[in-house]
Image: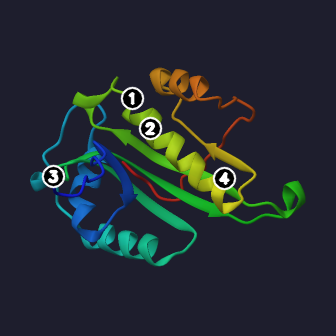
Amino acid sequence: MPAATEPRPAHVLRTATRADLPAVLALLADEERVVDPSAVVVTQAYERAFAAIDADPRNELLVLVDGGGTALGCLQATYIPGLGNGGEERALVEAVRVRADRRGEGLGRSMMEQVIARARARGCALVQLTSHKRRGDAHRFYAALGFARSHEGFKLALQDRS
């Protein structure tokens, strides 16, 4: 009689590899539609950025994939040491995306719960994120996860992006 095998999870959040880069860039390219990863141009700037994230133990680029390896979501977690709050580390979560045609299935919640668990296991005292003011649905999503609007954020562009 063959040994019973563990059921394979439907979705896995794992560290992104270089092979995932086009799919991650496709997720980041457009929040409102699905972008074909084969249509994404991976520039040298993206290659350098990915290599820097991959080599840095304080950074994780994570990708949510289905059983067939298709990227359904992504996020970046950066672990920041600090002297505030008794010297405790905090996690900064950025670039959270779920494929436009897969929203509403609980994938974003799953990703966020898993990254929060990773931060907790690492000993972080806090998970923080920012979200563009125009993303009302995302704000309601983060509030439902227990995130509080505790601070006002400010940014200063150092390069003209027009």
Q: How far apart are labels 3 and 2 at the CA level?
A: 23 Å
Q: Look at label 1 and name its amino acid.
A: Gly
Write down the residue under mark 4: 120
- Disc 2 is placed on an element classified as helix
Q: Is residue 81 left or right of residue 75?
A: right
Residue hosting label 1: 106
Q: Amino acid type of disc 3?
A: Pro
Question: What amino acid type should be assigned to the residue bearing mark 4?
Answer: Arg
User: What colouring does the structure picture have?
Assistant: rainbow
Q: Quadrant of residue 31?
A: top left
126 or 131: nearer the viewer:
126
Kindly identify the residue that appears in the image at 51 percent across and 75 percent down: 56
Binning the other alpha carbons within 10 Å of mark 1 as few (below 14), some (14 to 19) or many (20 upward) gives few
Name the element at disc 4.
helix
Asked if disc 2 and disc 1 are in contact, CB closer than 8 Å, the reply is yes
Q: Residue at x 23, y 48 (%)?
A: 26
Mark with earlier residue (4, 1): 1
Which residue is tagged 2? 110
From the top left corner, tell me how far across and down residue 30 is, in percent.
27, 38
Query: Looking at the image, do the residues carrying marks 4 and 2 touch, with CB atoms under 8 Å apart?
Result: no
**Of labels 3 and 1, the one closer to you:** 1
- Secondary structure category for the residue under label 1: loop
Distance (Cα) linking label 4 and label 3: 32 Å
Above or below 28: residue 79: below
